[in-house]
Amino acid sequence: MDKILSNLGLAKRAGATVLGLESVILGLQNNKIYYIFVASDAGNDAKKKVSNKAFYYDVEFSDKYTSDELSNAIGKNNVKVIGITNKELTKILK
């Protein structure tokens, strides 16, 4: 597992993550999301929605990792979208 995925697990344990497309979008609208991971194998609609919202709210995102990699990093199943809610952890995850 690479360093970013290890730190993503740390962010999850620290309570600094939001999981799921709708929860991440709600967090963006409330200015509580500072970085987004979207699975490279997520559906095109989900990717487009995340991309558009991230651009609108000026939040960076990564689609480098698959759903399996993201899921394993945080210990959950079938994770497609993760929002990071801590600015300091965001610096580590970029």
Image: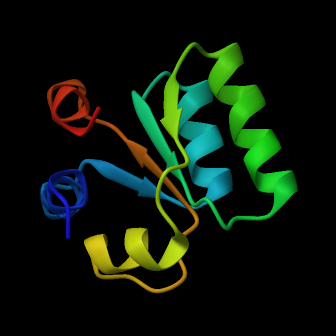
When the figure is inspected, residue 2 is found, relative to residue 64, above or below; the finding is below
- Residue placed farthest to the bottom in the image? 77
Query: Which quadrant of the view contains residue 74?
Result: bottom left
Task: Please report the residue visible at 74 percent of the width from the left and 48 percent of the height from the top.
Answer: 47
When the figure is inspected, residue 40 is found, relative to residue 87, above or below; the finding is below
Task: Indicate the quadrant containing the N terminus: top left, top right, bottom left or bottom right.
Answer: bottom left
Question: What is the total number of numbered labels drawn onto the structure image?
Answer: 0
Task: Please report the residue visible at 28 percent of the width from the left and 71 percent of the height from the top.
Answer: 73
Task: Please report the residue visible at 22 percent of the width from the left and 51 percent of the height from the top.
Answer: 4
Task: Please report the residue visible at 71 percent of the width from the left and 33 percent of the height from the top.
Answer: 51
When the figure is inspected, residue 49 is found, relative to residue 57, above or below; the finding is below
| Side (left or right) of 31 relative to 29 | left
Give the image location of residue 13, x and y in percent.
14, 64
Give the image location of residue 42, x and y in percent.
70, 65
Query: Which quadrant of the view contains residue 6?
Result: bottom left
Give the image location of residue 76, x and y in percent.
38, 82
As rendered, which of 61 and 53 lies closer to the eye?
Answer: 61
Q: How is the image coloured?
A: rainbow
Give the image location of residue 81, x and y in percent.
55, 57
Task: Indicate the quadrant containing the C terminus: top left, top right, bottom left or bottom right.
Answer: top left
| Side (left or right) of 89 relative to 50 | left
